[in-house]
Amino acid sequence: MSDRILPKLQVHKDIAVWSGGSPLEDTDVWFLHGFGESHLCFRDAFARPLAERMRIFLFDWPGCGASPPRQTGLTIEDAAQLCRDLIESFSLPRRIVLVAHSVGGIIATRMALLRDHSPDLVISVEGNLTLADAYFSGQAANFDEPESFYTWLRSKILEKAADDEDFRRYACSIQFADPRTLWTLGRSVLNYPSPGLDFLSLTCPSIYYWDPASTTDDAKQFLGGNGIRQRKLEGLGHWPMITSPSQFYAAVEQDVLSIVPRG
């Protein structure tokens, strides 16, 4: 019988957390979803060979998916502290890998800088490297209250959804997101004008996944000039874990096994 177990839902301080995979291995992989999305972006992780080699954790940020919003909203620093608390509650002293998508890349970087001991690997999946990458979230600074930003955001995403399958899925996620959460999180993104430099400053191993077709020119320039370890996932777009789960999770498994030291 396989040591792999089915995902289990736990609620930790109002945060919905799904865990599964192999409890006999010594590495935990935490997947961090992006702006206004949910753990469902990574729902295929439990069904991939990756889950036979390590434990898997998915969760929803407050105000997204199945986790209720906080009255004051959510900032990047709030999210980084929350991520640290989850990992310290569920995973220590095991090896830790963070796989973070989009704005989640800033959060993972901040969390790695906060921890007393860094994660063993940070994988940023089309994470923000420059201010130009905050093309949705960063617009929150132009609105004085949450509802007007939420209305604008939904309209822009629905425009793109008319002829883009990825944005049709994203539009569904936004329906479950709390307006104040999106507004406060988006405004806080602008407190980090050089997220790529923060990513470069990490003392732990890191790697950046990207598709040239969905990456901003500013991010391409940054990637070309700073010697960041990277993996191109050409043709998989901004959501490679949805476009081609087999290719994406095989890449994650390969990088974890080759970069993270084994006990």
Image: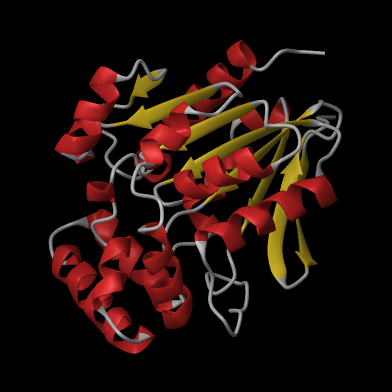
Q: Nearer the viewer, residue 47 or 28?
A: 28
Q: Is residue 45 left or right of residue 263?
A: left
Q: Is residue 179 left or right of residue 206?
A: left
Q: Is residue 116 left or right of residue 41?
A: right
Quadrant where the image shows the N terminus? top right
**Image vertical order of residue 180 relative to residue 41, above or below:** below
Q: In the figure, 10 relative to 3: above or below? A: below
Q: Position of residue 68 (x, y in %)?
A: 62, 78
Q: Is residue 7 visible?
A: no
Q: Residue at x 46, y 44 (%)?
A: 105
The coloring applied to the image is: secondary structure
Total tally of numbered discs in the picture:
0
Residue 248 falls in image quadrant = top left
* Residue 60 drawn above or below residue 31: below
In the rendered image, which quarter is residue 225 located in? Answer: top left
Residue at (58%, 23%) from the top-left corner?
Answer: 253
Residue 186 percent coordinates (x, y): 38, 66
The image quarter containing residue 161 is bottom left
Q: Quadrant of the C terminus?
A: top right
Q: Position of residue 77 (x, y in %)?
A: 57, 58
Q: Is residue 163 visible?
A: yes
Seen from the viewer's position, the closer of residues 145 and 44 is 145
Residue shown at 38% from the left, 20% from the top: 230
162 horizontally vs 259: left or right: left
Residue 62, image x and y in percent?
59, 70
